[in-house]
Amino acid sequence: MADSAGAMKIVAVIQARTSSTRLPGKVLAPVGEVTLLERMLAQVEGAKTVDEIVVATSNDPSDDELAERIAARGTHVFRGHLTDVLARFGNACEESGADVVVRLTGDCPLHTPDTVDEVVDAFLAADVDYASNLEPYSRPDGLDVEVFTKEALIRAVREASPGPDREHVTPFLRRDAGVRRLHHIHCSGPAAPHARWTVDDKADLEFVREVWKRLDLAGPGPHSYEAIMTATLSVAPTNPGAVSNFGYYKSLYDHADAAKAAPLRLVESEAWLRRSEVVTPGGAQTYSKSWRLHIRGVSPIFLERGSGARVWDVDGNEYVDLVQGLLPNILGYAHPDVDRAAYERAQNGHSFSLAHPLEVELAERLIRIIPCAEMVRFAKNGSDATSGAVRAARAFTKRDRVAICGYHGWHDWYICTTSRSAGVPDAVRELSHTFPYNDLPALDQLLASHENQFAAVIMEPFNHVWPAEGYLEGVKEIAHRHGAILIFDEICSGFHFGLGGAQRLFGVTPDLATFGKAMGNGYPISCVVGRRDIMQIFNDIFMSFTFAGDVSAMAAANAVLDVLENGDAYARMDAASTAMADGARVLAELSGLGNRFIAQGHRNWPLLRFLDDAGADDPVLRALWLQEVTRRGVLIISTHNISAALKRKDVEQVLGAYSAAFKYIGGLVASGADLESYLDGPIPTPAFRVRG
Ligand SMILES: Cc1ncc(COP(=O)(O)O)c(C=O)c1O
């Protein structure tokens, strides 16, 4: 600890109590020779920036033993309210004379002094009221550090409402507009945001004990982050599916209002729809953006503007938008860098009469990022790109049939495989064959059933179902054995699962691939990429349209890649998507609907499914949930389309809405109510279902 008092007194306040819900008494559990909390204290005492450590426990008799043990080792103990932990912190701060508080939780016996110092140093250098290493996480769970001024804390104590904001010390500080915050502190050393070094349950405790056995052999400590990281590498994680911050989700649930949500004012939306229906078949330009995907009379129909993760409808209602234009807005609406890049380009013209150098630069960049890309052709929509890829495959192989898995757009060759196939000639339909995901024998049989006739196997390599071990490799082998070209449609997976798409994630390189959606953060751009010998066929076939080389969308795509490649966008997406997926799961469980709700797939694009008792999709349960969360300010269809614009405040609003919706519906289900009678509009009708 700091050996001389500086101008400001910096006090680490470690909150600890023995009445933990999931593992009572955990802070006093033995970890080797001493207790878990004493392990943590010995580690934090190594922090050079901290003047004093206070253990803030409750004044409940259940914490008497804890208080005595900690005081006996010479550590300052403060006792305060059991559940108003915010007030407990405020009082501990006053009593210790702290100017700056470092908040730590007592269930982190692998905390490290260097992590504490890095965050305190960043706080001191930044002239802010609050700093943390939480958003984005780069350290393992269990190395959280939050630093704030006494003034900010006292204001939170004064102004925060009862409920989650007081049971947990910092939600108010992390959200309130008056607090100047610094979140993006990158601690040094290897990032490990998915590692679990905290102790919530028995499996965590076993892991920590194993790590400490190794650390004890290394010397007396305190041990650095790198040293502990090294020690953990030889211990198998015991709790891979565990949820962090369970306590936070639980208190959200406990305090959620279980009543039905109030209806939204939708007068303007309905008026615009009446006008639209006269001039627009379908009422919208994209099926999935029409009222049919939402609950008529409950949900908005027309949006007016968006900023970051939020949108406002024509009636002025505000929502956290988890649709994000059907995935494109990976950085959120109106991202300043992207808009500036597109606007500056447009100032010098953007739909030129000849090719433009930006086409070359962007292609070169994509070739560096995407494993299969050796050449690139640009387009506007995903459907352009998938259709171009299929035509290239047909021309290259001189074959006609196509094997299809997933969704690929609106053109004849694909849409004829769905129930919306009216208008497609039978001659086209006969050449398109679907195959089921994760079923290699089915694909093999399909290709064998018309030997030497399949030009391509086109598939979404991963949407909401994880590929079985070896599946994608198997698809590639089968396609090639039958002389077909493998096309990965990465229109959705391309950027949401990291740069380079699913082909990089799973290490399987297709012959051709298509990208789009998030590529331009809302500016229309897509592309076909792939093997040079196949791509050369574009010299002979015709894939050409007036706006394919539009330079403003290319400038936007370049700016998107700048952000995705150089910033912490993926780490921020990860933090938001983990909290929303974990939170949704915990809230469903607490409401008694744990076996009727699943979020499946990758965290950045999970499909939320609502099931009946037999495990089949339950459209009524889904619709009622949709009704309740929409009315509470969450715009969603079936998936979390995660954007890097999601801030803590947005995630809290989403989880607040989920808490209330699950609590309300859980109560109805428990009472045996007829759920449909609580719906205020018709059940939404997707065009067709090809995923999930
Ligand atoms: C996987 C996939 N491929 C292709 C498309 C078609 O893209 P677009 O609607 O831009 O034509 C989509 C659209 O949702 C898609 O999800």
Image: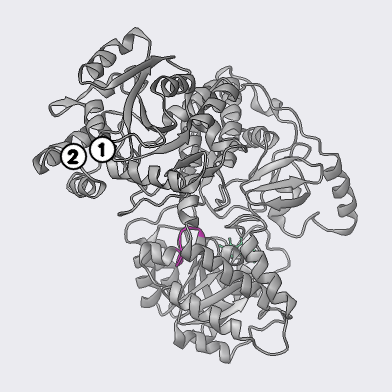
Comparing labels 1 and 2, the label whose residue is closer to the camera: 1
Q: Position of residue 534 (x, y in %)?
A: 48, 85
Q: Establish if 419 lies above or below 221.
A: below
Queried on whether the Cβ of the residue with tag 1 lies below 8 angstroms from ligand 1, the answer reads: no
Q: Amino acid at mark 2?
A: Val
Q: Position of residue 333 (x, y in %)?
A: 66, 55
Q: What type of secondary structure mainly makes up the magenta span? A: loop
| Image quarter hosting the N terminus | top left
The answer to whether the residue labelled 1 contacts the one labelled 2, judged by CB atoms less than 8 Å apart, is: yes
Residue in the picture at 46% in, 44% down: 578
Using the image, tell me which numbered label, if any, was put on residue 110: 1
Q: Establish if 424 lies above or below 188.
A: below
Question: Along the line of sight, which residue is nearer the eye, 277 or 664?
Answer: 664
The magenta-colored residue range is: 496-501
Q: Establish if 183 lies above or below 424.
A: above
**Which residue, given by chain and number where applicable, does mark 2 sit on?**
211
Q: Amino acid at mark 1?
A: Leu
